[in-house]
Image (cartoon, coloured by chain):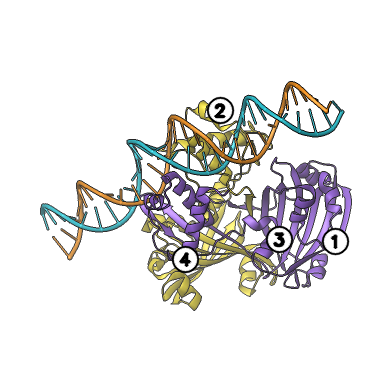
Chain colours: A yellow, B purple, C orange, D cyan
Amino acid sequence: MVARYERIADELRKEILAGVHPVGSQLPSESELAERHGAARGTVRQAVAVLAAEGLVGSRQGARRIVLGRVRSQSFAELHSFAQWARANGYRFGGQVIEQRRRPASGAEAARLGCEEVLEVLRLRSLEGEPVLLERTVYAEWVAGAVEKLPADCESVTEALYASAGLVFAYGEHLIDAVAAGAVDARLLGVRRGSPLLRQRRTTTTHEGRPVETSDDRYRAGSVAFSIRNSIGANPLARQAGDLRFER
Amino acid sequence: MVARYERIADELRKEILAGVHPVGSQLPSESELAERHGAARGTVRQAVAVLAAEGLVGSRQGARRIVLGRVRSQSFAELHSFAQWARANGYRFGGQVIEQRRRPASGAEAARLGCEEVLEVLRLRSLEGEPVLLERTVYAEWVAGAVEKLPADCESVTEALYASAGLVFAYGEHLIDAVAAGAVDARLLGVRRGSPLLRQRRTTTTHEGRPVETSDDRYRAGSVAFSIRNSIGANPLARQAGDLRFER
DNA sequence: AGGGCTCGCTTGTTTGTACAAGTTCCCCTA
DNA sequence: TAGGGGAACTTGTACAAACAAGCGAGCCCT
């Protein structure tokens, strides 16, 4: 059962993507949308809040909402999982474990993951047949067993861990910067030493806030970029009725 | 007049930062918070939604909300202005125009900015006395005049344009990747040619969706990183393959 | 001791109402 | 013609009331 506001959001999103509401144009007012869908205004507000969170529309008090763009920023699942992102965009992709071993946790790792022993995995991932990403992932001890059971060429670690252990990656913290390729990076990614790489360091946790893994992912320059839409409007969302809500 | 839910959010945020609610612990229930603040449950939901958007707390149906972290990750809200970001973090910073000239817009620029002539500005910015950022900004014709009136060592272009022309940068689209330093980049940033730079390309618009500028900002590696916190619910970031949209 | 089940608690969704605050645009006036 | 005033419209905030859905703890039975 999908929530009402999600269905309304889907429909609006489709209309925007189809060009019914061109970029720069105004969206119908909340009351109009409410009447059209036979829903309360609060429900419509939740729907447009979703679109605002995706960066598709912007709003300010007093004026009609405007369409900002057609490209939908993607979900957390796609940011977290290389496989899900690649699949959603129709790319051919693969993965291969290069090295895998247990070792004692460093001080920082022990603090972040809350355990003394960790499983370190070096994984090379490819897009359209080209190696583009080198992952150095460190798993907490309590998931190490499940990770070790995965095949070396596992396509989607995220999905495999969910299927085999019911593990869900719920929250993530990401740090993005640029680094020069080291000797190992260069050899595996097929670039020269010292050439630029886009680095994404992340730590993910479960729903309960329990740390699962921390990782250092390096993308070959030019292969991938991160995109984001933002607005200054502090509270583009929110809603009204009964129970408000909203994430921005 | 600050909204009620914002005051509640502020208070909760302070409590989290002060350790009243430690990382990993449960937040009071919505009803409890509502009673404590004498507000409706909906208002409290708006407040915690703000914290969720900041990545401070996570939630799932049926279980109490949990505290995810203490660091408020607002860096992407500050993505608009180098000066505002630097000031908020207590850094010494500066800026200097290296070159500035009007020229005809390229095809891509004309499409993005909606005008035939543009103002291109090359600006070097420093942090703690070190040059860290090289901005190649292209302004739309209608703001070119206001930009040209700014002093060459203007600290905050964003604030200066607001003060002088009432201009507000409301929405932004950003693409983040890594590139090798070119000859000019290397000389001005004081690094070797080919060394890695963190690149942020952006296009910003006003409240009405009118394009203001498009820019190619390059950070010296190690000087700055972008950070994001997000949950499986919704997030503003997406990966993009290749250079599909920002070719010059 | 272990497993299953129920019940209470908590968050999620939805509707309704009311007022506040900001925008847009038209009309009237100087 | 330029500017001011104001009315209509639109989004933002806040309240109250339900019900649905998921979680967790404790109870009971085997």
Q: Are marks 3 and 1 in contact (CB under 8 Å)?
A: no
Q: Which residue is mark 1?
A: B152
Instruction: Name the chain letter of the residue that bears numbered label 3.
Output: B
Cα distance, mark 2 to mark 3?
40 Å
Whichever of labels 4 and 2 marks the residue nearer the N terminus, that label is 2
Element class at badge 1: loop
| Tag nearer the camera, 1 or 4 | 1
State left or right for residue A164 relative to residue A120.
left
In the image, residue A54 lies at what x, y percent? Answer: 57, 45
Cα distance, mark 1 to mark 2?
49 Å
Report crowding for label 2: few under 14, some 14 to 19, many 20 or more residues within 10 A (C-alpha): few
Give the amino acid at mark 2: Glu
In the image, residue A25 lies at what x, y percent? Answer: 67, 34
Q: Which residue is mark 2?
A: A32
Q: Which residue is mark 3?
A: B82
Element class at badge 4: strand
Give the amino acid at mark 3: Phe
Give the amino acid at mark 4: Glu
State left or right for residue B34 relative to residue B179.
left
- Whether callout 1 and callout 4 share a subunit is answered no
Indicate the quadrant containing the N terminus of chain A: top left, top right, bottom left or bottom right: top left
Q: Which residue is mark 4?
A: A213
Element class at badge 2: helix
